[in-house]
Image (cartoon, helix red, strand yellow):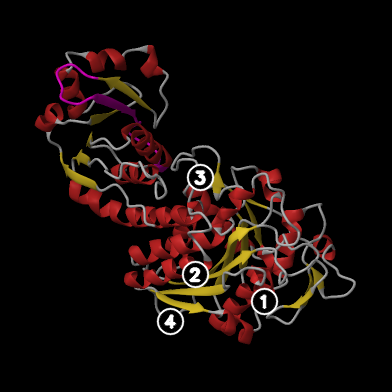
Amino acid sequence: MTTSLTPVTFAATDLAAIGEATGRVAVVVDPEGRMGQSARRVNRLTKGALKRFVESDAFAKMSAGKVTTLAWPVGMAAMAVDVLCLPRSHSVEEARKGGAALARLRGSDDLLLAADGTRRIAEVAFGLAARGYSFVDHKTDADATQGEVTITCAKPEDAQAAAVPLMAVAEGMFFTRDLINAPANVLTTTEFADQLSALTDLGLKVEILDEDQLAKLGMRTLLSVGQGSDSPSKVVVMEWNGGGDEAPLALVGKGVVFDTGGISLKPAGGMEDMTMDMGGAGVVAGTMKALATRKAKANVVGLVGLVENMPSGNATRPGDVVTSMKGDTVEIINTDAEGRLVLCDVMWYAQERFKPVGMIDLATLTGAIIIGLGHENAGVFSNNDAFCNAFLKSAASESEGAWRMPLGQAYDDLLKSRIADMKNIGGRAAGSVTAAQFLQRFVKDDTPWIHLDIAGVASVKSDTMLAPKGATGWGVLALNRLVADNYEAE
């Protein structure tokens, strides 16, 4: 269950290769219609067809990062010439957008991108690689062949060096997408743990805690979620020690491999989408893979709680009271508010064991966040302004939507229980906020903390800039950037 990146080769500009290339040829033209030497060669080969297009109203309406195709060009072996519009001083987002547009058109065809001296060509390559994803593990007629992508440019060695860490992040995104897209009968808790255990090949230290170990640790709220399932609950700890002796940043992910809602059974309509309820764990796993692949000079620990929420004669009932690892008691009002029960124990364990410099939890936690923010932004909750602002800056720089949401005592009061220390839900109003308030009760006062509710962004029904519909890999870019900008040694 591993989708591979399309290999991208960088080479020196070769004008002679343009006419001979099969598949697709792409050239870059700026919005003013200025063409580099490769575009001019295409124009000569096509007897002025490119110039006529560049002087047309259609080209004038093109925005940065857009691509238009000239099909079956006369005088060339290629089946198409793709014209990428990029200003000479384009942004990272525009470069990635252009690469993604080329990937959508390319499919599995060979592509020669004659980029000449285009800036940020590694970002264009990243867009090509990230958007070249397709989940075909369970399609019997899928064509597994991938065409070759060659990018010719003025300084191929520099472009290759700049692309290496970007491609490592793309590999992490692909891993996240594969995990989230996988059906629950394939990605069981055991298989998920096995997938993570294989990351030791990259230098990660991976430890799998089984149910007996979790019971000894007192992770009773986590275990209560999975006790109705035949799949064993697990916690997987992934350590990347690329820094010095400093305390690690902790990433904690909700890994509910399938969520029926338990005894508080969900409606049948749309329940098939609950294979993505392990999205938080998927993002943590992909981020850890990205950091290890690019050999990040930082200490980061990723912890994921892997459970399946099923109804059975042994399942947790509404009204049950469970004691958390922290020692607080929780009255279970709704068994479909299970993610917070998984996270609270793992968060407490992360703080007790690793004393992290900061902690970020990720979860497809509430439908309420989708009502509030749609599919454009994840909900961001935090107890520390500086930590939160650093993450928001990282997310914005990577064009991953994130919006800060409030916390407050009035919301926390909604969790009061008559018979226990707290309830696991606070009612219909402000559901995403009360869920965050529940989690904050398991954050120590001296721990900077961010909760990311990714229910609206982890998997979507339409294409995004860098991904086809389905799992997006949201969060890997932002978390990698946060680590790079704030926790890596110089």
Which of the 4 quarters of the picture holds residue 52? top left
Which of the 4 quarters of the picture holds residue 359? bottom right
Q: Is residue 155 magenta?
A: no
Instruction: Name the residue that disc number 4 marks.
Output: 245
Instruction: Name the residue that disc number 1 marks.
Output: 444
Q: Indicate which disc residue 470 carries.
A: 3
Residue range corresponding to the magenta coloring: 72-92
Q: Residue at x 42, y 19 (%)?
A: 61
Counting residues from the start of the chain, the first of labels 4 and 2 encountered is 2
Foreground residue among 304 and 245: 304
Q: Tell me: residue 33, above or below residue 177.
A: above
* Residue depth check, mark 3 versus mark 2: number of the one nearer the observer: 2
Q: Indicate which disc residue 358 carries.
A: none
Mark 1 is surrounded, within 10 Å at the Cα level, by few (under 14), some (14 to 19) or many (20 or more) other residues, namely some
Q: Tell me: residue 152, above or below residue 77.
A: below
Residues marked 4 and 2 touching at CB (< 8 Å): no
Instruction: Name the residue that disc number 2 marks.
Output: 190
Give the CA separation, mark 1 to mark 4: 22 Å
Residue 193 locus on image (x, y percent): 47, 70
User: From the image, which quarter does the N terminus lie in?
Assistant: bottom left
Counting residues from the start of the chain, the first of labels 1 and 3 encountered is 1
Q: Tell me: residue 374, above or below residue 170.
A: above
Query: Which amino acid, mark 2?
Result: Thr
Counting residues from the start of the chain, the first of labels 3 and 2 encountered is 2
* Residue depth check, mark 4 versus mark 2: number of the one nearer the observer: 2
Secondary structure of residue under mark 2: helix
Query: Which amino acid, mark 4?
Result: Asp
Does residue 344 appear anywhere in the picture? Answer: yes
Residue 62 locus on image (x, y percent): 40, 23
Query: Which amino acid, mark 1?
Result: Lys
* Residue depth check, mark 1 versus mark 4: number of the one nearer the observer: 1
